[in-house]
Image: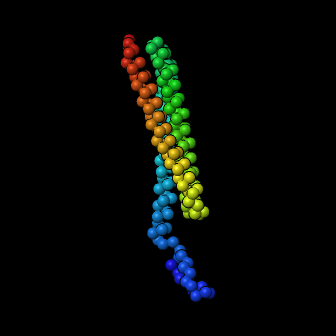
Amino acid sequence: MVIVMADDDSDVVIPEAESAEDKFAAERSHKASALAYDLCRVTAQACLLINGGAATAVLALLTKDKVDPALYRTVPWCLGLYAVGVTVSAAMMFSTMMMADHWNYFWYNVAYTRDRENAEAAEATANRWHKGVYLLFAAAIFCFIISSVILARALSSIDPR
């Protein structure tokens, strides 16, 4: 801190440039935020790929010469659930983006505008999107697992001859 004498003989405190600890904390915060966003995005992409890839594999299964009728009854359900998994994964990617946006609004309001009310509103919204990311992740994985189990049961009932 730098203390300067004002004209009216009172001391005025002028903050010095940020301390090394403050600069380090800000840098780490930026890096942690970017890393968290990237990891959420990659997780959503992975969910999208496993559901989309599984749907593609099921469609390839139907190109066999002789397809058991049990598969014709089961495949539409599996494809439907895989499609829901893909859609939920896309929603997870959107939720990740919205979560990051609202955390940016939070920090903008904390650091620049010093508007505590808007900062708290942005924080609450970011937290809701964050919970959405977790729920959508669980839904995408659930779609993949249930579809795969349904398909596995159908395949296990087929006579291999």
> Front-most of 59 and 25?
25
Q: Is residue 17 visible?
A: yes
The vertical placement of 75 against 127, above or below, is above
Horizontal and vertical percent for residue 22?
48, 68
Horizontal and vertical percent for residue 147?
45, 26
Q: Is residue 60 visible?
A: no
The vertical placement of 159 against 138, above or below, is above
Q: Residue at x 53, y 76 (%)?
A: 16
Q: Residue at x 45, y 69 (%)?
A: 21
Q: Residue at x 50, y 54 (%)?
A: 33
Q: Residue at x 51, y 54 (%)?
A: 34
On the rendered structure, is 161 left or right of 67? left
Horizontal and vertical percent for residue 133?
49, 42
In the picture, which quadrant includes the C terminus? top left
> Front-most of 36 and 130?
130
Horizontal and vertical percent for residue 70?
44, 14
- Indicate how the structure is coloured in the image: rainbow
> Front-most of 93 and 1?
1
Q: Quadrant of residue 144?
A: top left
Q: Residue furthest right?
A: 7
The vertical placement of 72 against 127, above or below, is above
